[in-house]
């Protein structure tokens, strides 16, 4: 994160900003907005205060005022470290971006790296790596004395939660993440044979070595539209390879940007995209992925293979699953 994000350079402005955040945390968004405005009088254009002001105005129902602050933030920072474009779209004041700003995603997770696992697993009861790993094992049971997969790539590997699930089942495991701080945390665990910092789609396209398994656990909520990444995976997957991922479940059949600034994906969209990029749907389940403010967050766990592949016999016999889009789907 840039030094400007840490301090305005004006001690009094920083103090008013801290008071504003405290009022916002207590739910007094009117007082918070007033203090953010006072902060900006002393430190015009300071991005954290502009974003705080936008959030406070949004919380008290002033959409026009929030949009004004966000527009100013976006003009001051074209790289969009604080996701002003996403916030404008969530307010309905701008088109929904197909993908989030790269600087926003990198900054979010660099800042989050030290507390990532505790926040997800202990506080939010995050379940994706273990449930996705179990589904992969159902589709491709382990063989006697040999890993189920030769080469695996963990997209958006984060601190290595998915890597810990995959390690015993893969001969060679690599990971890639946009956040250098996340990759550093993953490296400390010594789970991966190779780690890289970068965009997942670009990383897939940078090599030609076939992959037997590609995973993306809780990654596509920060990717948006998935056409490019599906095509990139299709270009790297071996003939009997698997592509396993999770998404938050959209109530419609398409791609939706939520107030959380995370993308959700509908079943109709995912199945249509799988078909268009040459994949067969081997497993498709709706499950609780984690908690969100005490409520269950529903999502889809999906395993794809090359068109013509079939699921393991146990999956093919599963009952119909009724999903949030109202579509009946057999996993297999």
Image (cartoon, helix red, strand yellow):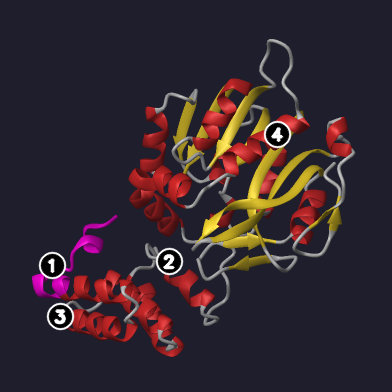
Tell me the magenta residue range: 1-15
Q: Earlier in the sequence, mark 4 or mark 3?
A: 3
SS class of the residue under badge 1?
loop
Label pair 1/3, CB-CB below 8 angstroms: no
Residue at point 78%, 42% (across, down): 283
**Badge 1 is on which residue?**
9
Q: Does the magenta stretch include residue 10?
A: yes
Q: Earlier in the sequence, mark 1 or mark 2?
A: 1
Q: Quadrant of the N terminus?
A: bottom left
Q: Which of marks 2 and 3 is nearer the N terminus?
A: 3
Q: Mark 4 and mark 2: span between their CA atoms? A: 34 Å
**Badge 2 is on which residue?**
83
Identify the main secondary structure in magenta: helix
Pointer 4 local density, CA inside 10 Å: few below 14, some 14–19, many at least 20: many
Q: Residue 42: which numbered mark, if any?
A: 3
Residue at point 66%, 18% (across, down): 147
């Amino acid at each position: 994160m840039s030094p400007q994000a840490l301090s305005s350079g004006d001690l009094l402005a920083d103090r008013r900003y801290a008071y504003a955040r405290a009022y916002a945390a207590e739910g007094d968004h009117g007082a918070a907005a007033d203090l953010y405005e006072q902060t900006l009088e002393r430190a015009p254009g300071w991005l954290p205060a502009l974003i705080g002001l936008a959030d406070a105005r949004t919380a008290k129902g002033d959409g026009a005022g929030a949009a004004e602050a966000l527009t100013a933030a976006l003009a001051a920072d074209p790289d969009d470290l604080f996701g002003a474009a996403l916030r404008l779209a969530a307010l309905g004041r701008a088109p929904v971006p197909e993908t989030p700003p790269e600087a926003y995603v990198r900054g979010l997770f660099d800042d989050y790296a030290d507390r990532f696992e505790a926040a997800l697993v202990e506080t939010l009861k995050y379940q994706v790596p273990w449930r996705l790993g179990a589904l992969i094992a159902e589709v491709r049971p382990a063989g006697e004395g040999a890993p189920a997969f030769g080469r695996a790539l963990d997209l958006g590997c984060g601190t290595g939660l998915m890597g810990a699930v995959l390690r015993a089942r893969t001969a060679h495991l690599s990971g890639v993440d946009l956040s250098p701080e996340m990759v550093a945390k993953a490296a400390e665990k010594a789970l991966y044979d190779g780690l890289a910092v970068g965009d997942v789609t670009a990383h897939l396209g940078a090599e030609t070595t076939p992959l037997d398994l590609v995973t993306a656990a809780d990654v596509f909520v920060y990717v948006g539209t998935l056409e490019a990444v599906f095509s990139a995976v299709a270009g790297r997957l071996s003939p009997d390879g698997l592509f396993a991922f999770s998404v938050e479940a959209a109530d419609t059949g398409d791609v939706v940007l939520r107030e959380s600034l995370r993308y959700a994906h509908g079943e109709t969209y995912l199945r249509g995209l799988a078909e268009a990029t040459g994949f067969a749907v081997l497993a498709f389940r709706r499950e609780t992925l984690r908690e969100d403010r005490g409520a269950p967050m529903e999502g889809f766990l999906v395993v794809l293979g090359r068109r013509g592949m079939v699921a393991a016999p146990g999956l093919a016999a599963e009952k119909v699953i009724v999903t949030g889009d109202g579509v009946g789907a057999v996993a297999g």
